[in-house]
Amino acid sequence: MYHRYIGDKAFYRRVFGIAIPIIIQNGISNFVSLLDNIMVGQVGTVPMSGVSIVNGLLFVFNLSIFGASSGAGIFTAQFYGSRDDTGVRHTFRFKLFICTALSLLGGAIFLLGGSGLIGLYLTGEGDAAIAAGALEYGLKYLAIMLWGLLPFALTNAYSSTLRETGETFIPMVGGIAAVCVNLALNYVLIFGHFGAPKMGVEGAALATVISRYVELAIVAGWTHSHPLRNPFIVGAYRSAYIPARLLKTIIVKGMPLLVNEFLWSCGVAILNQCYSTCGLDVVPAMNICSTLFNLGSVVYLSMGNSVGIIMGQMLGAGHSEPEVRDTNRKLITVSVASGLVFGILMAAVSGLFPEIYNTTDSVRHLAAQLICISAVMMPFGSYLNATYFTLRSGGQTLVTFLFDSCFMWVCCVPLAFCLSRFTNLSILPLYALCQSTDFIKCVVGAVMLKQGKWIQNLTV
């Protein structure tokens, strides 16, 4: 039993060789996001609410970019595993095209419909003046953040390709540099230090946009300046050619991932809108809860990326089914263990963390209770995340679509909508009931893993 779930030193050396740079990058990024959130929170509850709503909407765009890159990334990892540099180059081109197109589309949607989208989250009980103030702050923040959509998308195309080809250090360096720039500029621009104007939420947005251009310059610059280590970049811009057969296969296998991430993130946005109907205090409380949750979930989310990369490389290299299953089982064990540890830590600081924010006692108390609920669900979320990346690594994108976003829209969204509109449930039981649907997904995920249909080599 021990050897069934616990690997040897070589196994963990390989796993953490991939995972640790991703963990460091995501950990620093989320820690700075936490400090960024706290800085905005010091301006006041109303600005924090406006920024929180906009970031929730941008979350849909961010995950759509992630899904678009991930669809081609399935093939990138397997092409790399089979030592096919030309195949990697074609998948990188696809990422560039789809990420640029999504940036233009997302910018148009937010530019034309930003006010209406933000207003959906300000319908709960509370002072109308507070809602109007949150809308105003949100629109100011969004207007500047739109300039960062394209560099974010292009950075994702470069960084994901580097990770899938075994280079995790440079994306980590770019991410660290970006968050350091973001943090420094936040301090200067939000509060007006060192002679700079006091810009508040607009300063936070400007700092974020500048940091994204810094990250793109570092990651793309290194990639192009090291062609021997990144042979896929040689000639990548000389042509727009992608073989028709490969393009069709990427679209068939990869588009479900894009649609999945888009629908799933939209589902999350609608869930938050349903929660917001329970009162205006819910928006800042959920913001505080999600900020700590994002920091606590860094390890298991990064492990999910590692699962996808390692499984993709093993499948592309033609490893046997028993070996693939054994490695996957041990990877999932590491992921769940990390979720359990950080869930306990979240629960331990649930009463202290909200005290950092310049907000009301009622918001702090509500945030602490929401954090406890999220902490309980973290180990289950870690299992689902590892399962998702496992299924995806073998090209089971339609299955992951059904497993992820379809479940969200068939079960979670209708449940939240009905409970928030047709019952008198307060936010705590409403949130707990909606989160508990993950139990069902865990059972379904275990069945899918056991069936083994995801164990296939897509490069043959």
Image: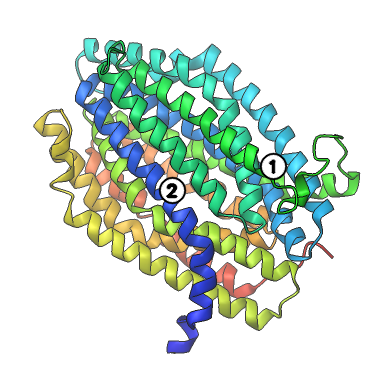
Residue 395 visible, this angle: yes
What residue is drawn where x is 33% and y is 31%?
Answer: 421
What residue is drawn where x is 21% and y is 28%?
Answer: 281
Q: In this view, does 8 lie above or below 119?
A: below
State the residue position of label 1. Answer: 225
Residue neighbourhood size for the residue with mark 1, other residues' Cα within 10 Å, grouped as few (<14), some (14–19), many (≥20)? few
Q: Which of marks 2 and 1 is nearer the N terminus?
A: 2
- Quadrant hosting residue 317: bottom right
220 horizontally vs 114: left or right: right
| Front: mark 2 or 1 | 1
Three-letter residue code for mark 1: Ser
Residue 362 at what x, y percent from top left?
12, 33
Quadrant containing the C terminus is bottom right
Three-letter residue code for mark 2: Asn
What residue is drawn where x is 44% and y is 73%?
Answer: 333
63 horizontally vs 288: left or right: right
Residue 13 at what x, y percent from top left?
50, 73
Please say if the residues under marks 2 and 1 sit with CB atoms less than 8 Å apart: no
Residue 102 at what x, y percent from top left?
65, 29
Task: Give the residue at the far left of this rendering.
Answer: 361
What residue is drawn where x is 83% and y is 40%?
Answer: 235
Tell me the distance, in whole angstroms, between the alpha carbons under discs 2 and 1.
25 Å
Render colour scheme:
rainbow
Quadrant containing the N terminus is bottom left
Residue neighbourhood size for the residue with mark 2, other residues' Cα within 10 Å, grouped as few (<14), some (14–19), many (≥20)? many
State the residue position of label 2. Answer: 26
350 horizontally vs 414: left or right: left
Near-viewer residue (154 or 441): 154
Residue 302 at what x, y percent from top left?
47, 56
Q: Is residue 11 above or below residue 25?
A: below
